[in-house]
Amino acid sequence: MSAETLDRSVAGSHAGGGDHGDVRGEADEVGTGPLGRRSRRPGRPRRMRGTRRKAVLVVGMMVVLAIPFVFPTWWMISSSLKSTSEILRVPPSLWPSSPDFSSYRGVFELQPFARQYWNSLYIAVLVTAGTMVVSSLAGYGFARIRFRGQNLLFLIVLVGLLVPIEVTIVPMFRAVTAMGLIDTHWPLIIIPIFGAPSVLATFIMRQFFVTIPDELEEAGRIDGLSRWGIFRKVALPLSGPALAAVAIITFLKSWNMYLEPVVFLSSRENFTLPRALTQYVDAYGGPMWNIQLAATTLTAVPVLIVFILAQRHFIQGLAQSGLKG
């Protein structure tokens, strides 16, 4: 081997060693895990910090947007523990200086509030149950049973959504008076179940039953089910989310019903809660603010808690019924 060939081989070995050194340097920069796997570069924590900042920003914005909705409830609860002079004080305080629960005792002393609470509760439960039965049957009929004039009849039913209760309250009062049902709870139960207030529930149920595949009904017919059997054993068990939405909407509407009790009820023992709340006044007809707010808290907070716990089913029912935005 000549000297020139030896020099070339030595130079090549140095060059190869340099390449291996670069590879080792890159490997050292990347690093390896305990099992020889490559570890991640320190860029991931930066991305995680960015994601956390966005999450904190979104939560902060939601908290700010929730203030106009949460503040009235907070003011109602805190003011129910204040005296009338402290409620009217300027500037107002967000928390009572000395919480006083005597206003809650006055709620039950000035009126038969427990009886009135029971009136609202059992009326709302009966109206909700009746509306669920009627709307599910009517909605299934409009969705799955074909008959002449079906769409026209459904359109006429939907017109009930456009008629406010103030328009029909006088004819209903005359009809209730003729039947001798004034100052009873029957008008507050029958009219919402079979009248215009149940139209929205019928629409929700109809929209849900339309989405049921025809193959399910055909399978039921093959198994020998009648039309009633298909409704009871196939369609109705699938309509849980829609029924939940109907139940929540109907219960809240009946619980907050005000005009009908004012027109049909006259004795305090038969009052419902919205009618009873207007009766907490002093000798001069002025509102007793602390007692009135205490009664409102007892009326609103339990229903608000139930709605918060059931809102997932409510939203799911509206989404599956085709009413999502």
Image (cartoon, grey):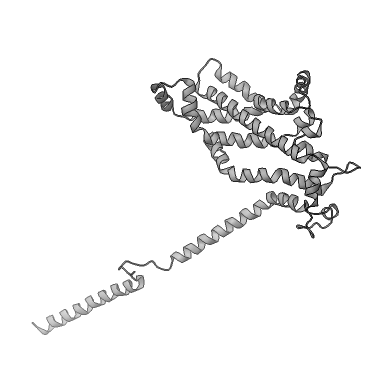
Residue at the spot 57% in from the left edge and 24% down from the top edge: 138
Give the farthest residue toward the bottom.
Answer: 3
Looking at the picture, tell me which residue is in the foreground, 137 or 215.
Answer: 137
- Can residue 322 be seen here? no
The quadrant of the picture occupied by the N terminus is bottom left
- Relative to 130, is 75 above or below? below
Where, by quadrant of the figure, is residue 130 drawn? top right
Relative side of 104 to 4, left or right: right
Residue 285 on image: x %, y %: 89, 41
Looking at the picture, tell me which residue is in the foreground, 246 or 66.
Answer: 246
Looking at the picture, tell me which residue is in the foreground, 304 or 122.
Answer: 122
Residue 110 on image: x %, y %: 83, 42
Where, by quadrant of the figure, is residue 292 drawn? top right
Count of numbered circles in the view: 0
- Can residue 144 be seen here? yes
Relative side of 131 to 320, left or right: right
The quadrant of the picture occupied by the C terminus is top right
Residue 108 on image: x %, y %: 79, 44
Give the farthest residue toward the right.
Answer: 284
Residue 19 on image: x %, y %: 26, 74
Give the farthest residue toward the top.
Answer: 148
